Image: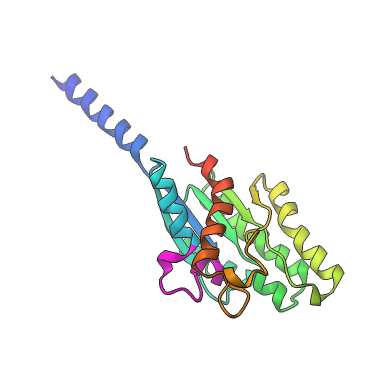
């Protein structure tokens, strides 16, 4: 009888372990937060969650986007965010650094420090880095060097890379709110697809 109870408990624990949702944490700035939208539910993190669930995948998405966030700000608040276990960590920061013309070495250092902390807290985490670009008015050297940060960090840290988060959206008036920077609901749907191409295969 004791053996049967032990077997039942073991099977129950195994079942719970295999059905636990995959926790996906989006860590970013106003793009992730859904700036300019009527509801955060219109932002791409929620759209990604809905798409994955519709595919029969068990996921839990956490939107940790904060408007105006820089890489330095992201590093400073990371410990609070990492109080919960994370299976997939999507890093979307640095755009505000670039728009402000901040030193690229500092941006790179901050992003790497974020990655290091995530790995220490969650050794088995799957990392995804969202590539970003900045306007050409900052100069060719700056814009080119900025864009290279993301694939270089992805390669160094064995992370998956979204080549350019706003692919198909940036520069299109019909897909952005009046500021021309942040996607509107239609734009976020395209961004969600950009994310799903990379994140989808990581969710088993």
Residue found farthest to the left = 1
Quadrant of the snapshot with the N terminus: top left
Q: Is residue 89 above or below residue 71?
A: above
Q: In the image, what residue occupies the spot 60% across and 51% down?
A: 128
The location of residue 66, given as percent across then percent down, is 51, 72
Q: Is residue 22 above or below residue 105?
A: above
Q: Nearer the viewer, residue 12 or 195?
A: 195
Residue 143 visible to the viewer: yes
Q: Which residues are magenta?
A: 28-43
Residue 33 in magenta stretch: yes
Q: Is residue 124 above or below residue 71?
A: above
Q: In the image, what residue occupies the spot 71% across and 57% down?
A: 150
Query: Which colouring convention does the figure follow?
Result: rainbow
Residue 160 in magenta stretch: no
The location of residue 201, given as percent across then percent down, is 54, 40
Q: Is residue 152 above or below residue 105?
A: above
């Amino acid at each position: 009888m004791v053996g049967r109870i032990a077997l039942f408990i073991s099977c129950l624990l195994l079942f719970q372990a295999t059905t636990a949702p995959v926790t996906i944490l989006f860590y970013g700035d106003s793009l992730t937060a859904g700036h300019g939208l009527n509801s955060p539910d219109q932002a791409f993190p929620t759209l990604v969650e809905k798409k994955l669930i519709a595919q029969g995948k068990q996921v839990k998405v956490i939107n940790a986007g904060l408007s105006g966030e820089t890489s330095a700000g992201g590093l400073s608040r990371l410990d609070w965010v990492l109080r919960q276990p994370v299976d997939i960590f999507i890093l979307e920061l640095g755009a505000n650094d670039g728009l402000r013309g901040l030193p690229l070495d500092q941006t790179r250092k901050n992003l790497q420090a974020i990655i290091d902390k995530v790995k220490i807290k969650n050794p088995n985490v799957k990392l995804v880095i969202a590539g970003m670009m900045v306007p050409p008015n900052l100069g060719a050297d700056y814009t080119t060097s900025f864009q290279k940060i993301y694939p270089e960090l992805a390669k160094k840290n064995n992370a998956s890379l979204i080549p350019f988060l706003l692919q198909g959206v940036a520069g299109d008036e019909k897909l952005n709110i009046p500021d021309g920077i942040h996607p509107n609901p239609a734009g976020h749907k395209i961004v969600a697809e950009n994310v799903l191409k990379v994140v989808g295969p990581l969710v088993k």
